[in-house]
Amino acid sequence: MKGIMNGIRVVEVAAWTYVPIAGAVLAEWGAEVLKIEHPEVGDPQRGLVTSGLVPSGPGGVNHMIELPNRGKRSVAINLKSEEGHQLLLKLAASADVFLTNFRPQARAKLKIDVEDVRAVNPDIIYVRGSALGQRGPEAERGGYDNSTFWGRGGPADIISSPGAYPSSQPGPGFGDVIGGLTIAGGISAALFHRERTGEAVVVDNSLLANGLWSIGATVLAADLFGFSRMPSGDRKRMPNPLVNNYKTGDERFISLIMLESDRYWSDLVTKIGHPELAEDPRFVDSATRATNCVDCVSALDDIFASRTLEEWKPILMDVEGVWAPVQTADELLRDPQVVANGYLREVDSASGTTFQMAASPLQFDGELPELTRAPDHGEHTDQVLTELGLDMDTILDLKVKGAIL
Protein backbone atom coordinates (compact mmCIF):
# COMPACT_ATOMS: atom_id res chain seq x y z
CA MET A 1 0.00 0.00 0.00
CA LYS A 2 1.08 3.57 -0.61
CA GLY A 3 2.82 4.69 2.59
CA ILE A 4 1.29 8.12 2.98
CA MET A 5 2.75 8.33 6.50
CA ASN A 6 6.24 7.15 5.53
CA GLY A 7 8.83 9.08 7.51
CA ILE A 8 6.47 9.85 10.39
CA ARG A 9 7.56 8.53 13.79
CA VAL A 10 5.03 7.99 16.57
CA VAL A 11 5.88 7.33 20.21
CA GLU A 12 2.90 5.66 21.86
CA VAL A 13 2.49 5.48 25.63
CA ALA A 14 -0.94 3.91 25.79
CA ALA A 15 -2.75 0.70 26.68
CA TRP A 16 -5.85 -1.33 25.85
CA THR A 17 -7.55 -0.64 22.49
CA TYR A 18 -9.04 2.86 22.18
CA VAL A 19 -5.86 4.91 21.74
CA PRO A 20 -3.41 2.17 20.64
CA ILE A 21 -5.59 1.36 17.64
CA ALA A 22 -4.97 4.91 16.41
CA GLY A 23 -1.29 3.98 16.35
CA ALA A 24 -2.13 0.79 14.46
CA VAL A 25 -3.94 2.80 11.79
CA LEU A 26 -0.96 5.14 11.41
CA ALA A 27 1.36 2.12 11.17
CA GLU A 28 -0.87 0.69 8.44
CA TRP A 29 -0.48 3.98 6.59
CA GLY A 30 3.31 3.76 6.78
CA ALA A 31 4.28 5.48 10.03
CA GLU A 32 6.89 4.02 12.37
CA VAL A 33 5.08 3.44 15.65
CA LEU A 34 7.05 2.68 18.82
CA LYS A 35 4.80 1.11 21.45
CA ILE A 36 6.21 1.80 24.91
CA GLU A 37 5.35 -0.96 27.39
CA HIS A 38 6.24 -1.64 31.01
CA PRO A 39 9.08 -4.20 31.19
CA GLU A 40 7.23 -6.53 33.58
CA VAL A 41 3.55 -6.48 32.62
CA GLY A 42 3.48 -4.81 29.22
CA ASP A 43 0.19 -3.57 27.89
CA PRO A 44 -2.36 -4.93 30.43
CA GLN A 45 -4.50 -6.08 27.53
CA ARG A 46 -1.94 -8.83 26.97
CA GLY A 47 -3.02 -10.22 30.32
CA LEU A 48 -6.57 -10.94 29.16
CA VAL A 49 -5.19 -13.94 27.28
CA THR A 50 -2.14 -14.80 29.37
CA SER A 51 -4.31 -14.89 32.52
CA GLY A 52 -6.87 -17.14 30.86
CA LEU A 53 -9.73 -14.63 30.96
CA VAL A 54 -9.92 -14.65 27.16
CA PRO A 55 -8.92 -17.69 25.08
CA SER A 56 -6.05 -17.43 22.64
CA GLY A 57 -6.50 -18.40 19.02
CA PRO A 58 -4.76 -21.19 17.10
CA GLY A 59 -1.02 -20.98 17.46
CA GLY A 60 -1.38 -18.80 20.55
CA VAL A 61 -2.65 -15.77 18.62
CA ASN A 62 -3.65 -13.03 21.10
CA HIS A 63 -6.46 -11.40 19.15
CA MET A 64 -6.95 -8.74 21.84
CA ILE A 65 -3.42 -7.50 21.10
CA GLU A 66 -3.27 -8.07 17.35
CA LEU A 67 -6.05 -5.70 16.28
CA PRO A 68 -4.86 -2.52 18.04
CA ASN A 69 -1.11 -3.16 17.79
CA ARG A 70 -0.39 -4.61 14.35
CA GLY A 71 2.58 -3.12 12.55
CA LYS A 72 4.25 -1.54 15.61
CA ARG A 73 7.56 -2.10 17.35
CA SER A 74 7.43 -2.80 21.10
CA VAL A 75 9.98 -1.12 23.35
CA ALA A 76 9.81 -2.12 27.02
CA ILE A 77 10.84 0.82 29.23
CA ASN A 78 10.20 1.47 32.93
CA LEU A 79 9.06 5.08 32.82
CA LYS A 80 9.21 5.33 36.61
CA SER A 81 13.00 4.98 36.55
CA GLU A 82 15.14 7.99 35.76
CA GLU A 83 17.01 6.05 33.10
CA GLY A 84 13.76 4.92 31.49
CA HIS A 85 12.36 8.44 31.55
CA GLN A 86 15.43 9.79 29.81
CA LEU A 87 15.22 7.07 27.16
CA LEU A 88 11.60 7.99 26.46
CA LEU A 89 12.51 11.66 26.07
CA LYS A 90 15.29 10.71 23.65
CA LEU A 91 12.79 8.79 21.56
CA ALA A 92 10.29 11.66 21.72
CA ALA A 93 12.98 14.11 20.62
CA SER A 94 13.10 12.41 17.22
CA ALA A 95 9.34 11.78 16.90
CA ASP A 96 6.57 13.60 15.08
CA VAL A 97 3.72 12.43 17.32
CA PHE A 98 3.41 11.56 21.01
CA LEU A 99 0.29 9.46 21.60
CA THR A 100 -1.07 8.64 25.05
CA ASN A 101 -4.18 7.70 27.02
CA PHE A 102 -2.61 8.14 30.45
CA ARG A 103 -4.70 10.35 32.73
CA PRO A 104 -3.55 13.84 33.79
CA GLN A 105 -2.15 12.88 37.20
CA ALA A 106 -0.27 9.89 35.75
CA ARG A 107 1.22 12.04 33.00
CA ALA A 108 2.33 14.62 35.55
CA LYS A 109 3.81 12.00 37.89
CA LEU A 110 5.75 10.36 35.06
CA LYS A 111 6.78 13.75 33.65
CA ILE A 112 5.40 12.95 30.20
CA ASP A 113 2.87 15.77 29.93
CA VAL A 114 2.78 18.30 27.10
CA GLU A 115 5.39 20.64 28.57
CA ASP A 116 7.75 17.76 29.42
CA VAL A 117 7.74 16.32 25.92
CA ARG A 118 7.72 19.73 24.24
CA ALA A 119 10.84 20.64 26.26
CA VAL A 120 12.82 18.15 24.15
CA ASN A 121 10.77 18.51 20.95
CA PRO A 122 8.81 21.76 20.50
CA ASP A 123 7.49 20.58 17.13
CA ILE A 124 5.87 17.36 18.30
CA ILE A 125 2.14 16.73 17.86
CA TYR A 126 0.91 15.76 21.35
CA VAL A 127 -2.21 13.57 21.33
CA ARG A 128 -4.40 12.69 24.32
CA GLY A 129 -7.22 10.18 24.33
CA SER A 130 -9.36 10.04 27.46
CA ALA A 131 -12.60 8.75 28.85
CA LEU A 132 -14.34 12.04 29.62
CA GLY A 133 -12.16 14.82 28.23
CA GLN A 134 -9.31 16.86 29.68
CA ARG A 135 -11.50 19.41 31.49
CA GLY A 136 -14.28 19.23 34.05
CA PRO A 137 -14.65 17.61 37.49
CA GLU A 138 -14.27 14.07 36.13
CA ALA A 139 -11.24 14.55 33.93
CA GLU A 140 -9.29 12.03 36.05
CA ARG A 141 -11.88 9.29 35.74
CA GLY A 142 -11.11 6.28 33.60
CA GLY A 143 -13.47 4.55 31.24
CA TYR A 144 -13.99 1.83 28.68
CA ASP A 145 -15.98 1.93 25.50
CA ASN A 146 -18.89 -0.13 26.85
CA SER A 147 -19.29 2.17 29.84
CA THR A 148 -18.32 5.58 28.51
CA PHE A 149 -18.81 5.54 24.74
CA TRP A 150 -21.78 3.19 24.73
CA GLY A 151 -23.43 3.95 28.05
CA ARG A 152 -22.71 7.51 29.09
CA GLY A 153 -22.33 8.67 25.51
CA GLY A 154 -25.91 7.64 24.70
CA PRO A 155 -25.97 4.80 22.12
CA ALA A 156 -27.09 2.18 24.67
CA ASP A 157 -30.18 4.15 25.60
CA ILE A 158 -31.44 4.97 22.14
CA ILE A 159 -31.46 1.31 21.06
CA SER A 160 -33.08 -0.02 24.25
CA SER A 161 -36.72 -0.13 25.26
CA PRO A 162 -37.70 2.21 28.12
CA GLY A 163 -37.25 0.46 31.45
CA ALA A 164 -35.45 -2.52 29.95
CA TYR A 165 -31.86 -3.38 30.74
CA PRO A 166 -29.78 -1.55 28.14
CA SER A 167 -28.00 -3.65 25.58
CA SER A 168 -24.24 -3.91 25.79
CA GLN A 169 -22.33 -2.74 22.74
CA PRO A 170 -22.33 -5.18 19.81
CA GLY A 171 -18.86 -6.59 20.47
CA PRO A 172 -15.43 -5.96 22.00
CA GLY A 173 -13.71 -2.77 20.96
CA PHE A 174 -16.80 -1.38 19.22
CA GLY A 175 -16.43 2.19 20.47
CA ASP A 176 -12.66 1.88 20.73
CA VAL A 177 -12.05 1.32 17.04
CA ILE A 178 -14.33 4.22 16.11
CA GLY A 179 -12.40 6.46 18.48
CA GLY A 180 -9.04 5.22 17.25
CA LEU A 181 -9.85 6.03 13.65
CA THR A 182 -11.06 9.46 14.75
CA ILE A 183 -7.75 10.08 16.52
CA ALA A 184 -5.79 8.95 13.46
CA GLY A 185 -7.75 11.47 11.39
CA GLY A 186 -7.02 14.19 13.95
CA ILE A 187 -3.31 13.38 13.86
CA SER A 188 -3.34 13.57 10.07
CA ALA A 189 -4.97 17.00 10.22
CA ALA A 190 -2.47 18.17 12.84
CA LEU A 191 0.48 17.00 10.75
CA PHE A 192 -0.94 18.80 7.71
CA HIS A 193 -1.39 21.97 9.80
CA ARG A 194 2.20 21.74 11.01
CA GLU A 195 3.41 21.26 7.46
CA ARG A 196 1.51 24.34 6.29
CA THR A 197 2.13 26.67 9.26
CA GLY A 198 5.00 25.25 11.30
CA GLU A 199 2.74 25.13 14.35
CA ALA A 200 2.51 21.96 16.44
CA VAL A 201 -0.85 21.47 18.15
CA VAL A 202 -2.30 19.32 20.93
CA VAL A 203 -5.00 16.88 19.76
CA ASP A 204 -7.70 15.69 22.16
CA ASN A 205 -10.39 13.03 21.82
CA SER A 206 -12.53 11.15 24.32
CA LEU A 207 -14.84 8.15 24.43
CA LEU A 208 -17.62 10.45 25.68
CA ALA A 209 -17.18 12.80 22.71
CA ASN A 210 -17.25 9.87 20.30
CA GLY A 211 -20.45 8.49 21.82
CA LEU A 212 -22.10 11.91 21.64
CA TRP A 213 -20.94 12.31 18.03
CA SER A 214 -22.33 8.92 17.05
CA ILE A 215 -25.86 9.93 18.13
CA GLY A 216 -25.45 13.59 17.18
CA ALA A 217 -28.64 13.67 15.08
CA THR A 218 -30.69 12.35 18.00
CA VAL A 219 -29.12 14.82 20.44
CA LEU A 220 -29.90 17.69 18.08
CA ALA A 221 -33.50 16.54 17.74
CA ALA A 222 -33.77 16.18 21.54
CA ASP A 223 -32.75 19.80 21.94
CA LEU A 224 -35.10 21.04 19.25
CA PHE A 225 -38.15 18.98 20.17
CA GLY A 226 -37.69 18.40 23.88
CA PHE A 227 -37.62 14.61 24.10
CA SER A 228 -35.01 12.30 25.60
CA ARG A 229 -35.01 9.71 22.82
CA MET A 230 -36.30 9.17 19.32
CA PRO A 231 -39.78 7.64 19.32
CA SER A 232 -39.57 3.91 18.65
CA GLY A 233 -42.48 2.82 16.52
CA ASP A 234 -44.14 -0.51 15.97
CA ARG A 235 -42.52 -2.11 12.92
CA LYS A 236 -46.01 -3.12 11.76
CA ARG A 237 -46.97 0.55 11.60
CA MET A 238 -44.02 1.95 9.67
CA PRO A 239 -45.36 4.83 7.54
CA ASN A 240 -43.04 3.64 4.79
CA PRO A 241 -43.07 -0.18 4.79
CA LEU A 242 -40.03 -0.13 2.51
CA VAL A 243 -37.92 1.13 5.41
CA ASN A 244 -38.10 -1.93 7.61
CA ASN A 245 -36.55 -5.31 8.47
CA TYR A 246 -38.16 -8.53 7.26
CA LYS A 247 -37.65 -12.09 8.50
CA THR A 248 -36.88 -14.81 6.01
CA GLY A 249 -38.03 -18.43 6.14
CA ASP A 250 -34.83 -19.52 7.90
CA GLU A 251 -35.08 -16.93 10.70
CA ARG A 252 -32.66 -14.50 9.04
CA PHE A 253 -33.35 -10.87 8.23
CA ILE A 254 -33.33 -8.51 5.26
CA SER A 255 -33.08 -4.75 5.68
CA LEU A 256 -34.95 -2.58 3.17
CA ILE A 257 -34.06 1.12 2.99
CA MET A 258 -36.04 2.49 0.07
CA LEU A 259 -36.79 6.04 1.12
CA GLU A 260 -38.35 7.02 -2.21
CA SER A 261 -41.05 4.38 -1.94
CA ASP A 262 -43.08 5.49 -4.97
CA ARG A 263 -39.96 5.09 -7.08
CA TYR A 264 -39.27 1.54 -5.91
CA TRP A 265 -42.57 -0.09 -4.90
CA SER A 266 -43.61 -1.47 -8.26
CA ASP A 267 -40.13 -2.72 -9.12
CA LEU A 268 -39.73 -4.46 -5.75
CA VAL A 269 -43.04 -6.30 -5.62
CA THR A 270 -42.73 -7.34 -9.26
CA LYS A 271 -39.26 -8.81 -8.82
CA ILE A 272 -40.15 -10.64 -5.62
CA GLY A 273 -42.95 -12.34 -7.51
CA HIS A 274 -46.06 -10.35 -6.58
CA PRO A 275 -46.74 -7.78 -9.33
CA GLU A 276 -50.39 -7.64 -8.32
CA LEU A 277 -49.41 -5.60 -5.26
CA ALA A 278 -48.29 -2.76 -7.54
CA GLU A 279 -51.92 -2.21 -8.56
CA ASP A 280 -53.51 -3.04 -5.21
CA PRO A 281 -55.59 0.04 -4.33
CA ARG A 282 -54.34 -0.14 -0.73
CA PHE A 283 -50.74 0.25 -1.84
CA VAL A 284 -50.74 2.30 -5.06
CA ASP A 285 -48.76 5.21 -3.64
CA SER A 286 -46.87 6.28 -0.52
CA ALA A 287 -49.92 7.93 1.05
CA THR A 288 -52.13 4.86 0.76
CA ARG A 289 -49.31 2.56 1.90
CA ALA A 290 -48.90 4.74 4.98
CA THR A 291 -52.64 4.59 5.66
CA ASN A 292 -52.66 0.82 5.17
CA CYS A 293 -49.20 0.20 6.61
CA VAL A 294 -50.26 -2.74 8.79
CA ASP A 295 -51.64 -4.59 5.79
CA CYS A 296 -48.64 -3.65 3.67
CA VAL A 297 -46.07 -4.82 6.21
CA SER A 298 -48.04 -8.03 6.78
CA ALA A 299 -48.08 -8.75 3.05
CA LEU A 300 -44.33 -8.26 2.81
CA ASP A 301 -43.80 -10.35 5.97
CA ASP A 302 -45.62 -13.27 4.35
CA ILE A 303 -43.66 -12.93 1.12
CA PHE A 304 -40.20 -12.75 2.71
CA ALA A 305 -41.04 -15.62 5.07
CA SER A 306 -41.64 -17.86 2.05
CA ARG A 307 -37.94 -18.22 1.16
CA THR A 308 -34.60 -18.52 2.91
CA LEU A 309 -32.08 -15.69 2.94
CA GLU A 310 -29.88 -17.52 0.45
CA GLU A 311 -32.87 -17.96 -1.86
CA TRP A 312 -33.71 -14.27 -1.63
CA LYS A 313 -30.21 -12.95 -2.33
CA PRO A 314 -30.10 -13.65 -6.11
CA ILE A 315 -33.68 -12.42 -6.50
CA LEU A 316 -33.01 -9.15 -4.71
CA MET A 317 -29.79 -8.52 -6.63
CA ASP A 318 -31.91 -7.18 -9.50
CA VAL A 319 -34.01 -4.87 -7.33
CA GLU A 320 -33.42 -1.17 -7.98
CA GLY A 321 -33.76 0.03 -4.38
CA VAL A 322 -31.35 -0.48 -1.48
CA TRP A 323 -31.51 -3.66 0.53
CA ALA A 324 -28.99 -5.65 2.54
CA PRO A 325 -28.81 -8.98 4.34
CA VAL A 326 -28.27 -8.72 8.10
CA GLN A 327 -25.00 -10.64 8.32
CA THR A 328 -23.05 -12.40 11.04
CA ALA A 329 -19.38 -11.76 11.74
CA ASP A 330 -18.28 -15.04 10.19
CA GLU A 331 -20.29 -14.29 7.03
CA LEU A 332 -18.24 -11.12 6.58
CA LEU A 333 -15.19 -13.35 6.11
CA ARG A 334 -16.80 -14.59 2.89
CA ASP A 335 -18.76 -11.53 1.77
CA PRO A 336 -17.86 -11.12 -1.92
CA GLN A 337 -17.63 -7.33 -1.60
CA VAL A 338 -15.37 -7.60 1.44
CA VAL A 339 -13.15 -10.03 -0.46
CA ALA A 340 -13.13 -8.06 -3.73
CA ASN A 341 -12.18 -4.82 -2.00
CA GLY A 342 -9.54 -6.31 0.28
CA TYR A 343 -11.23 -5.12 3.45
CA LEU A 344 -9.82 -8.17 5.27
CA ARG A 345 -6.11 -8.91 5.02
CA GLU A 346 -4.14 -12.02 5.87
CA VAL A 347 -1.61 -11.70 8.69
CA ASP A 348 1.04 -14.20 9.80
CA SER A 349 1.52 -14.49 13.56
CA ALA A 350 4.88 -15.00 15.24
CA SER A 351 4.07 -18.73 15.51
CA GLY A 352 3.24 -18.96 11.81
CA THR A 353 -0.54 -19.04 12.18
CA THR A 354 -2.31 -17.12 9.41
CA PHE A 355 -5.47 -15.20 10.23
CA GLN A 356 -7.65 -12.53 8.66
CA MET A 357 -7.93 -9.08 10.20
CA ALA A 358 -9.89 -5.98 9.24
CA ALA A 359 -7.84 -3.24 7.62
CA SER A 360 -8.62 0.37 8.42
CA PRO A 361 -11.59 1.51 6.28
CA LEU A 362 -9.62 3.86 4.02
CA GLN A 363 -7.66 3.10 0.87
CA PHE A 364 -5.34 5.37 -1.09
CA ASP A 365 -5.12 5.11 -4.89
CA GLY A 366 -6.98 1.83 -4.59
CA GLU A 367 -3.95 0.08 -3.10
CA LEU A 368 -4.56 -2.67 -0.55
CA PRO A 369 -2.65 -2.56 2.74
CA GLU A 370 -0.26 -5.28 3.79
CA LEU A 371 -0.78 -5.79 7.51
CA THR A 372 1.91 -7.20 9.78
CA ARG A 373 1.47 -8.80 13.18
CA ALA A 374 1.54 -7.08 16.54
CA PRO A 375 4.91 -7.22 18.33
CA ASP A 376 5.70 -9.49 21.24
CA HIS A 377 6.20 -7.74 24.56
CA GLY A 378 9.43 -5.71 24.31
CA GLU A 379 10.40 -7.46 21.09
CA HIS A 380 12.20 -4.46 19.62
CA THR A 381 13.74 -2.91 22.73
CA ASP A 382 17.36 -3.72 21.88
CA GLN A 383 16.91 -2.84 18.22
CA VAL A 384 15.36 0.57 18.87
CA LEU A 385 17.87 1.52 21.57
CA THR A 386 20.74 0.50 19.31
CA GLU A 387 19.29 2.79 16.64
CA LEU A 388 19.17 5.48 19.31
CA GLY A 389 22.96 5.15 19.65
CA LEU A 390 23.29 3.02 22.76
CA ASP A 391 25.95 0.29 22.76
CA MET A 392 25.26 -3.23 24.03
CA ASP A 393 27.10 -2.70 27.32
CA THR A 394 24.85 0.24 28.11
CA ILE A 395 21.76 -1.71 27.10
CA LEU A 396 22.76 -4.64 29.32
CA ASP A 397 23.38 -2.27 32.22
CA LEU A 398 19.88 -0.81 31.77
CA LYS A 399 18.44 -4.31 31.80
CA VAL A 400 20.21 -5.11 35.06
CA LYS A 401 18.82 -1.91 36.61
CA GLY A 402 15.28 -2.82 35.51
CA ALA A 403 14.94 0.25 33.30
CA ILE A 404 14.23 -1.87 30.22
CA LEU A 405 13.28 -5.45 29.39
Image (tube, rainbow, N blue to C red):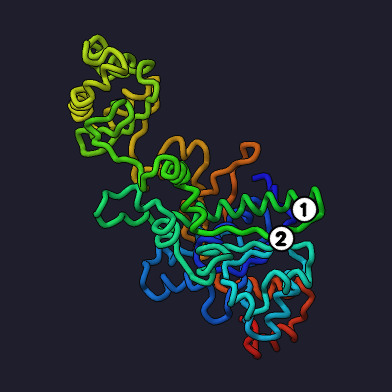
For the point 37% across and 68% down, which residue is it? 54
Q: Give the vertical position of 280 relative to 349 (above or below).
A: above
| Residue 348 pos. (x, y %) | 52, 57
Q: Foreground residue, 98 or 353?
A: 98
Determine whether, in the image, residue 58 is placed left or right of residue 134: left
Q: Give the vertical position of 248 relative to 91 (above or below).
A: above
For the point 60% across and 41% down, which residue is it? 363
For the point 76% across and 69% down, which residue is it? 118
Which secondary structure lies at badge 1? helix
Residue 253 is marked as none
Q: Is residue 330 visible?
A: no
User: How crowded is the residue under tag 1: few (<14 C-alpha within 10 Å), some, or many (20+)?
Assistant: some
User: How crowded is the residue under tag 2: few (<14 C-alpha within 10 Å), some, or many (20+)?
Assistant: many
| Residue 196 pos. (x, y %) | 80, 48
Residue that carries the numbered disc 2 in the rendered image: 125
Residue that carries the numbered disc 1 in the rendered image: 194
Q: CA distance from mark 2 to mark 1?
A: 8 Å
Q: Quadrant of the C terminus?
A: bottom right
| Residue 187 pos. (x, y %) | 66, 54
Q: Please name the amino acid that badge 2 sits on.
A: Ile
Determine whether, in the image, residue 90 is placed left or right of residue 285: right
Q: Please name the amino acid that badge 1 sits on.
A: Arg
| Residue 159 pos. (x, y %) | 33, 47
